Amino acid sequence: MTTKRILLAAWCFPFFGLGCDVNVPFGGNDTFESVEDAVRDLQDAFTEAVADPLGARPFPVLIGGDDQTVYYATSLTDVRLRFPGPTTDVVFPSFVGPSNLYKFEESRRELIAPLVPGGAYSGLATDGRFVVYALADVHGSNPFSPYVFDLWSSATKPLLENGADESAYMDTIVVHGGRAAFAMYDETEDGFAPKIRVADLEFEEPTIEIELSFGTLDVPLAMRGDRLAYVDGPSGGSLQVLLRDLTSGETTVVADGIRAEYAPSVPVFLTDNGVVWSEPGVAGPSRVQRYIIQTGATSVWSDGVRGVLAGATDEHFVTEEFVVGESDTPDRWLVRKYNANGSSRKLAGFRADGLAGQTRVIGNRAAWVNPDREIVLAPLSGGERNSFRPF
């Protein structure tokens, strides 16, 4: 069989100074199946070329998913500092991009969008079709502007009006079911006016669906289906957990009178049937509570919880605790799962190197990134866990 060599300079990103050769194992008279095999080889070569063009071996950043699929990104411009001995390594994540977007499905990873302009650690979020990210607008009036990238059409569009005196927060972007919710603020003569904006991404141009004023500049958000949960109230004051029905416009006060130094210390999550949030305790451990939407009942799920609430379902919640190491031991992450009755067990403990950690609940699984840059998936109902490298 004749072998032809094809130079894929355009595919191998010459602006990085890279090139690659691919051997195509068919001659001009071979079958169409051989052509298909060659195309797959070219796609694999393309994936290899863009995965890590600078040789930085970037950490993956978890950005979304469900029971079947995990979405993650890798920033191509991360900087990692390694220290001798047991000291924890440090990664300075890039907030300006570019990033590669991947999905892991049916035990197979796939590059689905190379060189997304947004940094993997700058609010990048996706529901599998729409990718929303924030960019620093160095030339315009918006310090951080959110954009939406449609994976189906490859179109990119802004979510804020160009030239308006408004900006988004990088770490408060959520995307679900064709909607994006994010915290933003307007600059006025009296200072900053914080808002939550929900945009419908299904239209040809993203359409503002809801805009809510709220009292804090940094607000925890959760969105699932037609429901939006968020925390409101002044920093250092009395906070509320609120639930908004995006269809009817009705807002329910789920919890009131929460004492916390600032709103992000009250993380909130939506499950199929409820709202789960954490309230900081006086001595350190926190209290996790849940609200059942159908009945309106609120109860304490577990008291004396250590670590940060990282995600929840109707039957489980997961926490991530940062443990500071002594002089001869590295810092560590501890991941715990809590069951319906409030009992718990440790899922993992590992060095807090680089971007390791990132614990969250994706579908019916706990997910985190270990120090070896692997994504680990542990079924909440029990069973064999899965781990894989990002590329």
Image: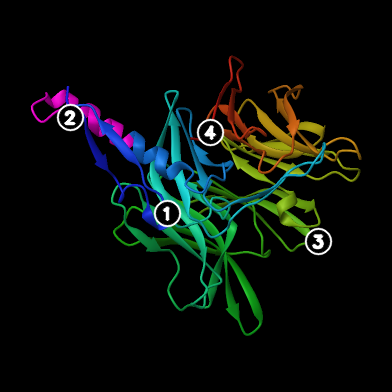
Task: Give the mark nearer the N terminus: 4 vs 1.
Answer: 1
Question: Label 3 belongs to which residue?
Answer: 236
Q: Which residue is mark 4?
A: 272
Which region is colored magenta?
Answer: 27-43
Residue drawn at the location 67% of the way across and 38% of the way down: 356
Tag 1 secondary structure: loop
The amino acid sitting under disc 2 is Val
Q: Crowdedness of circle 3 by 10 Å Cα count: few (<14), some, many (20+)?
A: few
Q: Position of residue 376 (x, y in %)?
A: 59, 28
- Residue 42 in the magenta stretch? The answer is yes
Q: Mark 4 to mark 3: distance in Å?
A: 31 Å
Is residue 365 shown left or right of residue 6?
right
**What residue sits 51% from the left and 49% below the top?**
54
- Dot 3: element: loop
Between disc 4 and disc 1, the foreground one is: 1
Q: Position of residue 35 (x, y in %)?
A: 17, 29
Alpha-carbon distance for marks 2 and 4? 46 Å
**Residue 256: x %, y % from top left:** 73, 51
User: In the rendered image, which residue does mark 2 sit on?
Assistant: 35
Does label 1 or label 3 sit earlier along the sequence?
Answer: 1
Q: Quadrant of residue 271?
A: top right
Q: Residues within 10 Å of mark 4 (few under 14, many from 20)?
A: few
- Quadrant of image for the N terminus: top left
